[in-house]
Image (cartoon, rainbow, N blue to C red):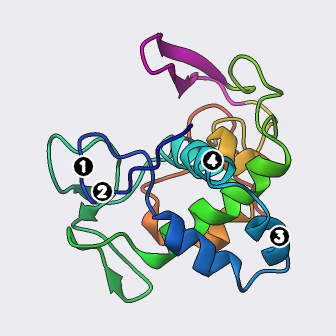
Amino acid sequence: MATLDATLAGEDSNSYCTAAYADAYAENQSWAADWAALTDDQKAVALIGATQWLETLSWAGSRCEDNQRLAWPRSDASCDGITAACTAIPRRIQDAEVELAWQFHQNPNAINGGGGAAQGTYVKRQKLGSLEIEYDQYSGTSLTGCDNCNDPAVITAFPWIKGVIGACWFSGLSGGVGLMLRVRS
């Protein structure tokens, strides 16, 4: 059984939000009844998986504690009038986790087809104890015709998640290979 740990700035945290937060958020979605029908274990697995993919993003600001496992909470960042604080994780980050959790519950292979790294990424590190896989992106030096080759896999698979989170929480999405500027006259 999966154990959800949403301890703020915790050394063993694996979720940005609690199960209660996820349930409350889901109550107002079109998929509320389907979410409510999931077991606690199914919800925990989906939330943990969503958090792992959100962890692949580059966030504005800096971690609050050196030993915190997850990227959030953060300080020295603000977005849409909200200033990041070490006492809470912004609602939009937690909302994005629940939205992604629902997507991953429906299709656990939504990003990479269930094995290996997604296109434009590679497996940087694998760990057998507690089964952990860390992905990284290739950063080349020549431009291609791809508009989002270097965007994180979660953004490429679910581009709408940027709107849920708020792009100003990110420290950057595109760059290196695949960045193409287009000018219309």
Residue highlighted by disc 1: 10
Separation of marks 3 and 2 at Cα, in angstroms: 52 Å
Label 4 crowd bin: few (<14), some (14–19), many (20+), radius 10 Å: few
157 or 86: nearer the eye? 86
Precedes in sequence: disc 1 or disc 4 = 1
Q: Secondary structure at mark 4?
A: helix
Precedes in sequence: disc 3 or disc 2 = 2
Residue 179 can be seen in this image: no
Q: Is residue 79 magenta?
A: no
| Residue occupying the point 69% across, 30% down | 143
Q: Is residue 54 above or below residue 115?
A: below
Q: Mark 4 against mark 3, which lies toward the viewer? A: 4
Q: Mark 1 against mark 3, which lies toward the viewer? A: 1
Label 1 crowd bin: few (<14), some (14–19), many (20+), radius 10 Å: some
Q: Mark 3 against mark 2, which lies toward the viewer? A: 2
- Percent from the top left, x then y, of residue 47? 59, 52
Residue 65 can be seen in this image: yes
The residue type indicated by label 2 comes to Thr
Separation of marks 4 and 3 at Cα, in angstroms: 54 Å
Residue highlighted by disc 2: 7
- Percent from the top left, x then y, of residue 178? 69, 37
The magenta span reads 121-143
Separation of marks 1 and 4 at Cα, in angstroms: 21 Å
Q: Is residue 47 above or below residue 73?
A: above
| Residue occupying the point 49% across, 12% down | 126
Where residue 41 is drawn, which disc sits there? 4
Q: Secondary structure at mark 3?
A: loop
| Residue occupying the point 47% across, 77% down | 91
- Percent from the top left, x then y, of residue 182? 76, 56
Residue highlighted by disc 3: 185
